[in-house]
Image (cartoon, rainbow, N blue to C red):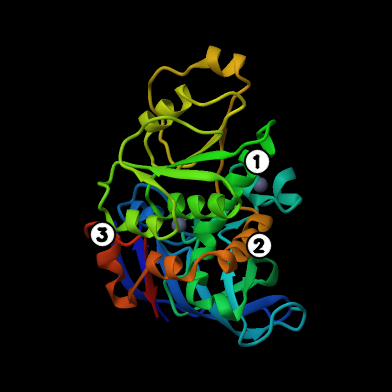
Amino acid sequence: MKALALDFEARTLAWSHLDSPEFFANRDVLYRVHEVGVCGTDRALASFQLGAPPKGETRLILGHEALGQVIETGSGVKSLNRGDWVVPTVRRACKPACSSCARGRRDLCISGKYTERGILGLHGYFTERAVDAEEDLIRVPLKLVDCGVLIEPLSVAEKAIARALAVHEGEPRTALVLGLGPIGMLAAMVLKARGFGVRVQSLEPLDHPRAAILELQDIPYESVLTGSADIVIEATGSTEAALLALRQMPPLGVMVVLGAPDGAGPVPFLRMIVNNQTVVGSVNADLEAFHAAVEDLARFERRALAALITRTRFSDLRRTLTGAPMVAPKVVHVL
Ligand SMILES: [Zn+2]
Ligand SMILES: [Zn+2]
C-alpha cells in the first residue's frame, strides 16, 4: 500500500510501501481513502515541528482530514454498511483512559497521553486503505460527499463556537472571526448560519480570493484588526491580534483561542473582571461537534463550499506540504 510518510530518523518526507492495516472482524470498518485535506498541522508536521511515529516505528503516515468509502465491516458493526461514506475522527483515547477519555470526551483528555491519527503516535490517511472502529467514524450523507472532506476542520470550529455559547452569560449577537484560514472561514459560516452578525478580520488584502468567498455569503471581510464582538474566534495564529480584540471586547464577551502561540502583551485583567469576560482555549472536537458539522454542511451555500476546496492529485502531496502555501482555503488530494 502506497503511503506518504514522515521518517523521523532520516528526517525526510517520502512515499513508502506499507502493509495494509490490520482488520479485526468484529468491530472494525475497512474503508478506501478517497480524499484527504491538508492543513497547517500537516505543514508543521512535514517540517518536523511536531508529531511522533507509532510506538516502535520510525515512520508516520501523515493525513488526518480524510473522506473514505466503506469496503468491509466487522460482524459487530451496526451503523455502517459497505458503500457508506465516512469521515474519521482524529483523536484516540489515552490508555488507561483518563476521566475525560473514559466518558468519550477525548478532546478534553487530561493525561495528555492521547494519540492522534496522522499526527501523534498513530498512522494517518495519506494512503489507500484505512481501518477504524465504528465509533471513530462519522457517516457522511450521500448529498454531502463532495464537501465531506471539510467535516473534520469544520468540527474544530463547531466545538469552539459551542464553547463560546456555553460560556457567554448574556445574549450574544455579534461575532468576530480573526483569520482567513479554513477554520476561520468555516467558523464565520457557522456563526452566520446561527444568525450572528459576523465579520472576519485578517491581514490578507481586501481583494484576496478568500475574501471573495466570504463576500459570496454576505460575510464582511476587513483587512485591518479593529474593534471586537460578543463572540471572538481567534483562528489567526497571532497573539497580537487576539490581545487587540480582547482589549475592546464588550461586557460578557467570550474569546475562544484556537491558533495563537505563546506571546507577550498587556492582558486587560481588570477590564475583564469588571466586564465578566472570558478567554477559553479549545482543541480538537467531540462527537457532538462532528455531528453539528454534518448538519451545518447541509445548510451552507453549495457555491461557497465548492469555492473553499481545490482538488489536486495525490502524487502532488509532497509539494503541497513543503512548497509555498496555496491560495485555496482547503487543498484536497484525491486518491
Ligand atoms: Zn487539520
Ligand atoms: Zn485521556
Residue 136: x and y in percent read 65, 66
Task: Write down the residue under mark 2.
Answer: 291
Callout 2 environment at 10 Å: few (<14), some (14 to 19), or many (20+)? Answer: some
Instruction: Judge by depth and name the residue closer to the eye, 25 or 202.
Output: 202
Q: Which residue is at a point 51% across and 26% down the rendered structure image? A: 249
- The residue depicted at 67 percent of the width and 58 percent of the height is 287
Residue matched to label 3? 322
Q: What number is the disc on residue 165? A: 1
Measure how far apart labels 1 and 3 are at the Cα level: 37 Å
Q: CB atoms at circles 1 and 3 under 8 Å apart?
A: no
As drawn, the residue found furthest toward the front would be 218
**Camera-nearest label, 1 or 3:** 1
- In this rendering, the answer to whether 129 lies above or below 92 is below
Q: How many marks?
A: 3
The N terminus lies in which quarter of the figure? bottom left
Where residue 304 sits, quadrant-wise, is bottom left
Q: Can residue 85 be seen from the camera position used here?
A: yes
| Figure quadrant of the C terminus | bottom left
Amino acid type of the residue tagged 3 in the rendering = Thr
- Classify mark 1: helix, strand or loop: helix
The percent coordinates of residue 267 (x first, y second) are: 46, 19
Specify which label sits upstream in the sequence, 1 or 3. 1
